[in-house]
Amino acid sequence: QALEAGIRRGLERKEFFLHYQPMVCLSTREITGVEALIRWESPERGLVPPSEFIPVAEDSGLIVQMGRWVLHSACEQARAWQDAGLPPVPISVNVSALEFRHLGFIDGVQAALSETGLAARYLVLELTEGVLMEDVESTVSLLAQLKSLGVHLAVDDFGTGFSSLSYLRQFPIDVLKIDISFVREIGPVQTDSAILSAIINMGNSLKYRVIAEGIEIDKQRAYLLDKQCAEGQGYLFSPPLPAPQLVDLFLSEP
Ligand code: G
Ligand code: G
Ligand code: MN
Ligand code: NA
């Protein structure tokens, strides 16, 4: 309640901002996309982690307003980078359950695109497997409407739920993000992960972009590449960064 009031005030006082984490090609390390991640610097509380305020924003419904701001800001930033001549890559935005199922969501996405002039194909909406599976019938309809705008769709944290990839086929998905828990299994003493290989193979055969999350060591990068996972994200390449530092990263590309 105190936190909820703080979030509400924070939104009014513009205390929220975005960090950006690149996705890269696992063989060349070229940047293939950027994920926007919200941050909150409260004058009273300091830097509050999203794991603390996102659940409260969800329970209170403030996530709708927050999500609109994130969408607009991320699209605005992506458009600004393109205008500045950086290689155009898609920007990913996380969408939580309540936001996705909110009546104004599709219009909000359309508004963010038209207000910022970002071409729809450069926007990726990340939805977790759990959110997609919650109400399959309405999910199918919502995703169809989003696809008709021209945006791309990603399944976030894939592998943590109980849905098989074949089940996901009824959704018009473009990107599969493999949950960090699978990448963590690739440790110093490695046991071959059959599930990980199966996810990558099925994702590839369904023509999704397959992206492994949370890559921290080169051994994980090499292992995933060997298993035909083309893209990844994680501290090995870059942590989430403020926009100017992400530009430096773009400019330092080989
Ligand atoms: O960096 P990381 O701590 O940013 O993010 C923690 C969690 O918060 C992740 O599960 C991430 O998906 C979620 N998250 C980060 N930014 C956003 C956002 O803008 N909207 C939503 N709904 N979730 C976000
Ligand atoms: O849930 P989602 O995948 O949207 O959130 C991404 C989360 O993963 C963010 O909190 C981000 O800061 C975090 N993250 C990004 N790269 C790494 C990594 O290499 N290791 C770990 N542990 N977390 C990471
Ligand atoms: Mn995500
Ligand atoms: Na994820």
Image (cartoon, rainbow, N blue to C red):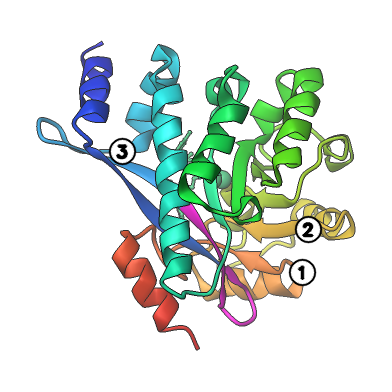
Decide if ligand 1 comes within 8 Å of the CB at mark 3.
yes
Cα separation, mark 2 vs mark 3, equals 31 Å
Front in this rendered view, residue 54 or 61? 61
Q: Name the residue carrying label 3.
A: 49
Indicate left or right for 98 with 166 as reference. left
Q: Residues within 10 Å of mark 1 (few under 14, many from 20)?
A: some
Cα separation, mark 2 vs mark 1, equals 7 Å
Q: Residue at x 63, y 74 (%)?
A: 26
Q: Tell me which label, 2 or 1, sits earlier in the chain.
A: 2
**Which mark is drawn over residue 227?**
1
**Which mark is drawn over residue 144?**
none
User: Of helix, strand and loop, which one carries label 3?
Assistant: loop
Decide if ligand 4 comes within 8 Å of the CB at mark 2.
no
- Asked if the magenta segment contains residue 31, the reply would be yes
**Residue farthest along the bottom direction in this orientation:** 254
Residue type, numbered disc 3: Pro
Image location (x, y in percent) of residue 102: 57, 18
Indicate left or right for 214 with 128 as reference. left
- Labels 1 and 3 touching (C-beta < 8 A): no
Decide if ligand 2 comes within 8 Å of the CB at mark 1.
no
Q: Residues within 10 Å of mark 3 (few under 14, many from 20)?
A: few
Q: Name the residue carrying label 2.
A: 200
Specify start and end residues of the magenta stretch as a single range: 24-35
- Asked if the magenta segment contains residue 114, the reply would be no
Front in this rendered view, residue 49 or 138? 138
User: Does 29 sit above or below residue 71?
Assistant: below
Q: Residue at x 60, y 64 (%)?
A: 232
Indicate left or right for 141 with 189 as reference. right
Q: Tell me which label, 1 or 3, sits earlier in the chain.
A: 3
User: Does 243 sit above or below residue 46?
Assistant: below
